[in-house]
Amino acid sequence: MGAQRVTGVSKGAGGYRPTVNWREITVKRRNTADKQVLVCITLSGVLIVVVGVVCTVLGFLVIASQCPFMWMETPGACYYLARHNASWSSGREYCHSQSASLLDLHSDEESDFIQDVMLGRSWLGLRRKKDRDDWRWLTGAKVNYTKWQNPNSVPTDTSLSYCAMMEESGDWLAVPCHGEDSAYVICDYTPGYNPFMLVGPVVTVCGLVVLVLSIEVCVRRREFIEKNMEVISDTEDDREEESTGLINQGYSGWVVSEA
């Protein structure tokens, strides 16, 4: 009894060698990977869009009021009525600590609103500095509205600084800024631009861009594979031959013959 090498035998040590279509397996794996990547990117884009929509809703509903907590809100302005009397200088410093300014008024509507809610005569953020003959708001706004109790009685003396206060009747008085007069403090705050209002729309747009680009990339890749299928087939056939040659080596080429 002996052993001899027989060429061209397709049997292996465990029986017939199974036929493996490596190209089919590779294509299936590639298609599965493409689908997984597409699903992952699509879900990410959808999630980004959802987050953007939620932020947009919060921006327009929850943060629609930009006035600080406990402040009174009117269109375009916020007011805080301090429940204490103070000098004009102390009132200015207090409002400044609240990132606001002493009250300034620019229309009868504003004046009527403040007159209805004020606790008593209150300071205005309007003053005329020493050696000057013009009145200015602390905010730098233009003085386009006044309501002096008696315009003819407004001091013209430029040797002192004068500040304005509002009586409960709504009329204005001019008193020395550094005198002994005291009044309630009303802080005025004008809401500025809130950048959070743009977060939602920006995130939503980014999510849509991710969705569009992900779909575009997958479509272009699939088109590339379809147009270059012959090149891919030749490469896969070469790999299959190499793999078959490796499997046929070894015990698959040996059989036992009877003596």
Image (tube, rainbow, N blue to C red):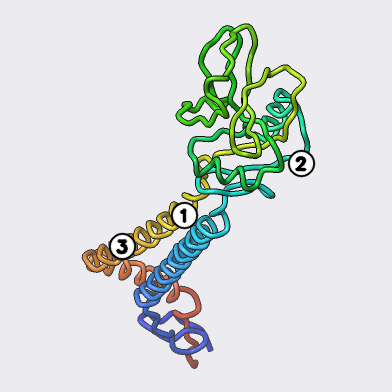
Q: Nearer the viewer, mark 2 or mark 3?
A: 2
Looking at the picture, how far across and down is residue 149, in whole percent?
Answer: 57, 29
Which is in the foreground here, disc 1 or disc 3?
1
Up-down relation of residue 251 to residue 50 (above or below): below
Kindly check if marks 2 and 3 are in contact, taking CB atoms under 8 A apart as contact. no
Residue at image point 29% right, 65% down: 219
Residues at marks 1 and 3, CA–CA distance in whole angstroms: 27 Å
Q: Which residue is mark 3?
A: 221
Q: Residues within 10 Å of mark 2 (few under 14, many from 20)?
A: few
Secondary structure, mark 3, is: helix
Q: Which comes sooner in the sequence, label 1 or label 2? A: 2
Snapshot quadrant of residue 161:
top right
In the picture, measured across the screen, residue 157 lies left or right of residue 37, that is: right
User: SS at mark 1?
Assistant: helix
Does residue 11 lie above or below 35 as drawn?
below
Place residue 58 in its image quadrant: bottom right
Residue nearest the viewer, comparing 174 with 53: 174
Lateral position of residue 211 relative to residue 189, left or right: left
- Give me the disc on residue 203: 1
Assign a secondary structure to mark 2.
Answer: strand
Three-letter amino acid code at the position of disc 1: Val
55 relative to 37, above or below? above
Q: How many marks?
A: 3
